[in-house]
Image (tube, helix red, strand yellow):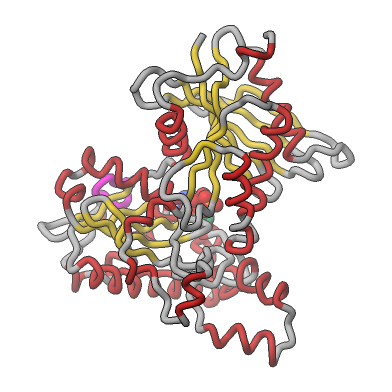
Amino acid sequence: MMPVLIVLNAGSSSLKFQVYDVVDTAEPLLVWKGLYEGLGGGAHFVVKANDGRILEERTWDAGEQVGHEEALMHLVAWLSQFRDERRPVAIGHRVVHGGEAFSGPVLVNDAVIETLEALVPLAPLHQPHNLEPIRIVRRRLPGMPQVACFDTAFHQSQSDIATLFALPREMRERGVRRYGFHGLSYDYISSVLQDNDPRLAKGRVIVAHLGNGASLCALHKAASIATTMGFSALDGLPMGTRCGAVDAGVVFFMLREMKLSPEEAERVLYTKSGLLGVSGLSNDMRVLRSKAGSDPDARRAIDLFVYRIQREIGSLVAALGGLDGLVFTGGIGENDVATRAEVIAGLAWAGLSLDEVANRAGGPRVSAGSGPAAWVIPTNEELVIARQTRSVLGPSYPDPHRNQGD
Ligand code: ADP
């Protein structure tokens, strides 16, 4: 019987999962991956083999109550058909915020849940959804070890100064500081630099995680020294629907002059801004690229996105004291040939030059010449969660089924 780990990534109406074989100290091996979406009304389930082949699909009627709990129990039931070959021994969760308390993954217990709940005000749109499946598993599958893996933890290597806002000291004491996010993605990229380009593993690298959420991270010797996201996942680059950095004075204007409630202002900044807000068209880079020739607003949204990436790269090069490499990852970074070309075109001052043929082919190396190297490396946050979960559990996996008579 093969022990397997379940990796969960829960959103407001979705639950993504991956299942990994874990053998001794070898890299966890992906077996199945899938998704529940439309939770709360008209849910859909799909599970695929590790080669992308669809194994099973199901859609529930809009009237049927399928929330996170039903989805999780459906997954457990689906997995139980393989119980003689593979048995879940632990669940690893993506949790956006680990606050100051957690600089690495942690085995969940009641005290940990309490600490993580106290962080909800720091990530009100993500943290509650991440914690829900943890609570469900504790209730429905007591004895199943759970590990929380954080998007913030990778940035705990940053210096005090890099994390500080110029605000009154008592605010820092209340946890108002730069945390940084996308840490599971940066952890993965930093772990594979050595295989791609050993020079980068020892050097100064900027990773551009460009997806629906987008941020940059400066790595020195594969550790985070600065990042564009700060206290919340709103800061830094413009994103699909998030604004990125705006002058805090804009928020007062929204509240005082536009008479928006805090909740309305939050909704504008998180869900109506970014590529969507500027283009008035879409948050999807594919749509914007297809319209950029005919729609000036789509073009402006892309131009702003690229311009802000270039400016923030300048800032991170200063923090690093130079640049040895740039890595593109995330849905846009991995797939959008034009965004990579446009970003690199503005970085000639840093010695970067584009290899157009390699870029069109998707890399992996997309730079020419002897200056800093540019790479395309697909990220794998779920693998990092599987690695971290296993490292927390140690080599002897507890069998959660042992005392349940099955
Ligand atoms: P998330 O942050 O939600 O994980 P992803 O990393 O999947 O998001 O990135 C989603 C973004 O990637 C969307 O803007 C989408 O348009 C973009 N994207 C995906 N495939 C392509 C492609 N082939 N060309 C351009 N953009 C793409």
Q: Position of residue 337 (x, y in %)?
A: 37, 55
From the viewer's side, name the closer residue of 335 and 114.
114
Quadrant of the image occupied by residue 82: top right
Q: Is residue 79 above or below residue 353?
A: above
Relative horizontal placement of residue 395, taking residue 373 as reference (left or right): right
Q: Is residue 170 visible?
A: yes
Quadrant of the image occupied by residue 204: bottom left
In the image, which residues are magenta?
358-365
Q: Position of residue 14 (x, y in %)?
A: 67, 44
Residue plotted at (80% across, 37% down): 66
Q: Is residue 169 above or below residue 193?
A: below
Q: Is residue 133 magenta?
A: no
The secondary structure making up most of the magenta span is loop
Relative horizontal placement of residue 221, taking residue 74 as reference (left or right): left
Farthest left residue in view: 370
Q: Position of residue 216 (x, y in %)?
A: 37, 62
Residue plotted at (57% across, 86% down): 250
From the viewer's side, name the closer residue of 117 and 14.
117
From the viewer's side, name the closer residue of 258 and 159.
159
From the viewer's side, name the closer residue of 11 and 364.
11
Residue plotted at (33% across, 64% down): 226
